[in-house]
Image: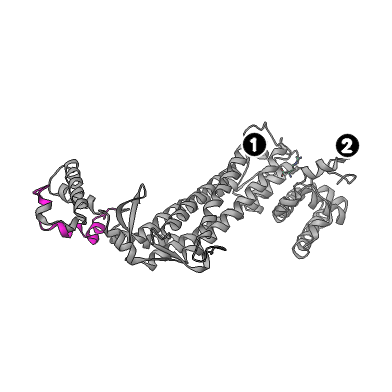
Amino acid sequence: MSGSKNLWGGRFEGVADEGFASFNRSFGFDRKLFEADVRASLAHCAGLRRAGVLSEQEAEQIRNCLQTILKRAATDASYFDELPSEDVHSFIEARLVQLIGDAGRKLHTGRSRNDQVATAFRLWLRDEVDAVAESLRLAQGALVELAEAHREAVLPGYTHLQRAQPVLWAHWCLAYFEMLQRDRVRMAEVRRRVNVMPLGSAALAGTSYEIDRAAVARELGFESISRNSLDAVSDRDFCIEFASASALVMLHLSRLAEDIILYSTTEFGLLELSDAVATGSSLMPQKKNPDSMELVRGKAGRVYGHLTALLTVMKGLPLAYNKDMQEDKEAVFDTVQTVKASLEVAATVLGNVTLNEERAREAAARGYMNATELADYLARKGLPFREAHDAVGRIVLRAIERGVELDGLTLEEMRAFSPLIEEDVYAALSLEQTLKTKAQTGGTSPARVAEALTAARALLDES
Ligand code: ARG
């Protein structure tokens, strides 16, 4: 860059130090914004034309030239490397000037790279937010299919990672479906605040040209225009909100990953990953490792890092634009790429997981997971729940001593703890009955879960 012409020419007599110039340069990564910046430039050109700043002939020249640049970039892989540029905005301007001279120099009238970068970044992110939402939908679809693949299956449910109460397998799948549904709604909300146009704020004070900002915004599909120029050029809340919503997506995927990893250990033995999404060991021939989900779990840390970086970069900045903000790009770019890839891999893994139904049923029927059911049985017969809980605790202790499950005790043995217990207790303690009674909305009874599956399908089809 040393010796070459900068965007700021006149005021400067010396040339930039090469080390600093390369430190200052963002073109290596912000070229991702190329198409968005050309789009915004086309709309700005139309705005300048309507304001009478450009003649029709100049506007026409600029439009054609921007189209040419777009085409070149799409067909020629080395196009971006021909001119050394500081950033994507100076690259496009240099190309315009190179091809059409003075008309190209006029396009920057009434705008600054400060409102330009905010506009291009928002345009770019708007599409990516939609792409993330679509990836979320596909992952949700994989969860619904996995639920439907084992419609009748049960699973031991855990709290504190200790066996707690049996649940339907589909109920577990739909728990993750709910998390991803909230993520999808969150992304839609983030999109609304991304979809505000800063263009027309210029460097910080607004523009003195009579550009119809609302018309430019309409052309670019923005829902509204920013109301304060100082805020508009220095606001990166939209990046932080996106990173934050993404961090939650990754948190949910990471918990899903943890469950899948844990359930596929020999110790749990509930799930099996197909060879397509597992790896072996270079040393231990017997190994089958869940690398796919371990990487998803690991990448959550990476996205949290980006969120922290963005918050930290912004926290002490005086109004308005500061170059610190150039640091926003790589954090957001990598967040987009990581979240999309993680969702895709998670969906693939969900399509490559098999539940060992028999073992899951066995596990769900053992470990006194019906003890709560027995307490509820006594409570329904009039015993205060606290007392019922206490009696059942003692019954469990007796069963443990005897080395049997609750239904392995005789009626007499149980009645010694409460005369309210009768012959019908055995039916109440069955796995089927335990599940069936959880019949309120949100519960794991087969009827409620079937409804929830239908509702989940409907949610997927509706958007
Ligand atoms: N490349 C810069 C960024 O990403 C935009 C340029 C604004 N630079 C400036 N010196 N005003 O933030």
Q: Position of residue 374 (x, y in %)?
A: 19, 51
Asked whether residue 421 is drawn in magenta, I would say yes
Q: Which residue is mark 1?
A: 231
Q: Which mark is residue 447?
A: none
Q: Position of residue 107 (x, y in %)?
A: 80, 49
Element carrying mark 2: loop
Q: Whereabouts is ligand 1, in terms of quadrant? A: top right
Tell me the mark number nearer the camera, choosing from 2 and 1: 2
Q: Earlier in the sequence, mark 2 or mark 1?
A: 2
Q: Is residue 323 left or right of residue 140?
A: right
- Residue range highlighted in magenta: 414-440
Q: CA distance from mark 2 to mark 1?
A: 29 Å
Q: Residues within 10 Å of mark 2 (few under 14, many from 20)?
A: few
Q: Which residue is mark 2?
A: 12
Q: Is residue 238 visible?
A: no
What amino acid type should be assigned to the residue bearing mark 2? Answer: Phe
What amino acid type should be assigned to the residue bearing mark 1? Answer: Asp
Q: Is residue 437 visible?
A: yes
Asked whether residue 452 is drawn in magenta, I would say no
